Image (cartoon, rainbow, N blue to C red):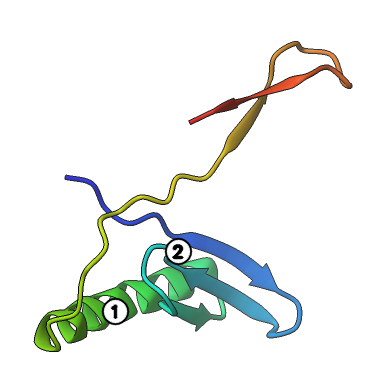
Amino acid sequence: MKDYHINIFYSTEDEGYIADIPDLTYCSAFGNTPLEALQAVLEAKTIWLETAKAKQKPIPEPRYKPMIYVPEHNQLGQIFKVIE
């Protein structure tokens, strides 16, 4: 089963970690650690999906795929290719 991609990053402005789910508009959460942010966004995801179902709103399929860059060659300055 596919699930939604979760981004977790440190925010210097908020002085903590932000987790978001790009496929679910405005679904994000804060934590003092990456684990706290992850736990909070998983709760937010559950609430987001339950609310969408209750209000008969469309629920998007998981589609977001981050681009991962890997060096095509082992030397710096070489061309990178995108792996999806």
Vertical comparison of 74 with 12: above or below: above
* Label 2 neighbour load within 10 Å: few <14, some 14-19, many 20+: some
Vertical comparison of 76 with 10: above or below: above
Q: Which residue is mark 1?
A: 43
Considering the image in quadrants, where does the N terminus appear? top left
Where residue 79 appears, x then y in whole percent?
78, 19
* Label 1 neighbour load within 10 Å: few <14, some 14-19, many 20+: some
Q: Which mark, residue 26? A: none
Nearest to the observer: residue 41 or residue 59: 59
> Which element is circle 1 on?
helix
Residue at mark 2 to residue at mark 1: CA–CA distance: 15 Å
Where residue 49 appears, x then y in whole percent?
21, 76
Which of the two discs, 2 and 1, labels the residue nearer the N terminus? 2
Q: Nearer the viewer, mark 2 or mark 1?
A: 2
Q: Amino acid at mark 1?
A: Glu
> Which element is circle 2 on?
loop
Residue at the spot 43% in from the left edge and 59% down from the top edge:
6
Q: Amino acid at mark 2?
A: Pro
Left or right of residue 15: residue 84: left
Left or right of residue 74: residue 14: left
Where residue 55 appears, x then y in whole percent?
14, 88
Vertical comparison of 10 with 77: above or below: below
Q: Which residue is mark 2?
A: 22
Residue at the spot 26% in from the left edge and 53% down from the top edge:
3
Q: Residue furthest top?
A: 73
Query: In which quadrant of the rendered view does residue 21 lie?
Result: bottom left
